Image (cartoon, rainbow, N blue to C red):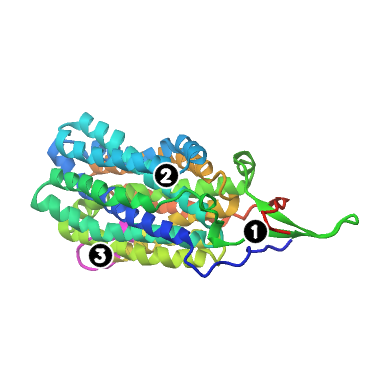
Amino acid sequence: MTSSTGGPRSSRIFYGWWVVASSSAMTFFASGLFFRGFTVFFRPVRDSLGLSDAQTALVFSLARAEGGLEGPAAGWAIDKFGNRALLVPCIILAAAGYFAFAWFVDDFWSFALVYLGMVSLGNSIAFQHAMFAGLNNWFRRRRSLAISVLAAISSLGGMVLVPVVSFIVLKRDWHWAAAASGVAYLVIVLPLTLWFRNRPEDMGLLPDGDAEPPTVAAPARGGHAARRLEIRDYTVREALRTRTYWFLLAGSGLRQLASLGIQVNIMPILVESKGVDEQLAATLVGLMFGITFASRLALGFFADRCPKAYLLGGAMALEGVGFLCLLLGDWNGSGIWLILAFIVLEGVTDGAGVIIWSALGGFYGRDRFASLRGIVTFSQSWAQVASPLFAGWVKDHYGNHQLAIMLAVVFALGASASCFLMRPPPQLTRERVQQPGQT
């Protein structure tokens, strides 16, 4: 069989790129204030509330895992009601959560309730599920590039806003930084949803701006003339029967197990285990996100042209090398260069994670993407809790994070092996559906 990429496209800018632009602008703030910015809150919240490293890491790791825990339910709701139906109310919930975080948190339980039940829940559903599913709906051939642009702007948000949030925390305190985050969500992020649309079909368009769905040529058989069959998407049950899905799930889970404990604890690791000044550490983390910005754009470009399994496998192996540099480095003498090597390597390879979702959409299609993604995120939610919590426990008991970093090296290499084993599943087809006016 040979694939067809679809019909001719209009010379006008495809509306899907406006969806990418508005989504990227929203994610810029969500990343800088929540997905990346939480690292700045770690130490001041811990010290202000009198918590241990393990207690603080538990809440922040549960916040990251929450996107997986509600994954199946969120995926089902998105596939049934559309992305925008969840995006808008969840942004409002996150904004209200930041105000409550600033004004009503004074002990561990209020911290856990507000951060998990409002800030994290709103951000996770809006920006981990609804937004990724939305972009997957708008693109087929340029899916990797579209998702990588979103992810690149996300890392740019970390580069710009993490030092800003750190500055507010140091000059005022973390309560001011939390309140400012709530204002940003209501004044800037929420209005950007006006440009977000669920699917191209809602506007009389097709993915990538094509004039007709992609088809494959079916050879002539038994006296029947050759014909073209329309490519169809996998159902959830069909996808779960392929080995590729389980290799992708394993690779994604092992990568979370490797990287999330380091990312949640990156500020304590750099400041307390590696001897970096606090503001300099925030600047280094911002630099890492800046490198990720360029890396994600490059990876998105190549992922639409190269085998995704090899691209992911190579990137995750390189991430393991970066964790090894962090393990051996410190902010004294020649060890500085190893810390800087980690910042560069983690910046380059952190962008590879989003290619997992591009691969999922490319392998299995658009119709059940949110549900299939929800299963993946749910299955790895235990790793999102265990990895940061274990890193905090290691610091509490051994005075540094070395054991946690050592295991991150091992898990990153395991993720690399799983991704190298992935192979694209076969394309599924159906009789071509004639559109009005087609012959």
In the image, farthest residue toward the left: 171
Circle 3: element type: helix
Is residue 67 left or right of 43 when viewed as pictured?
right
Residue 330 within the segment the image draws in magenta: yes
Name the main secondary structure of what is drawn in magenta. Answer: helix
| Residue that mark 2 sits on | 84
Residue at the spot 15% in from the left edge and 36% down from the top edge: 103
Residue in front for this viewpoint, 341 or 232: 232
Amino acid type at image mark 2: Arg
Q: In which quadrant of the rendered image does the N terminus lie?
A: bottom right
Circle 1: element type: loop
Circle 2: element type: helix
| Residue that mark 1 sits on | 214
The magenta stretch is 324-338
Residue at the spot 39% in from the left edge and 65% down from the top edge: 295
Q: How far apart are marks 3 and 2 (CA)?
A: 48 Å
Q: Which of marks 3 and 1 is nearer the N terminus?
A: 1
In the image, farthest residue toward the front: 437
Label at residue 45 = none
| Residue that mark 3 sits on | 335
Mark 1 is surrounded, within 10 Å at the Cα level, by few (under 14), some (14 to 19) or many (20 or more) other residues, namely many
Q: Distance between the residues labelled 3 and 1?
A: 53 Å
Residue in front for this viewpoint, 217 or 404: 217
Q: Tell me where residue 347 sits by quadrant.
A: bottom left
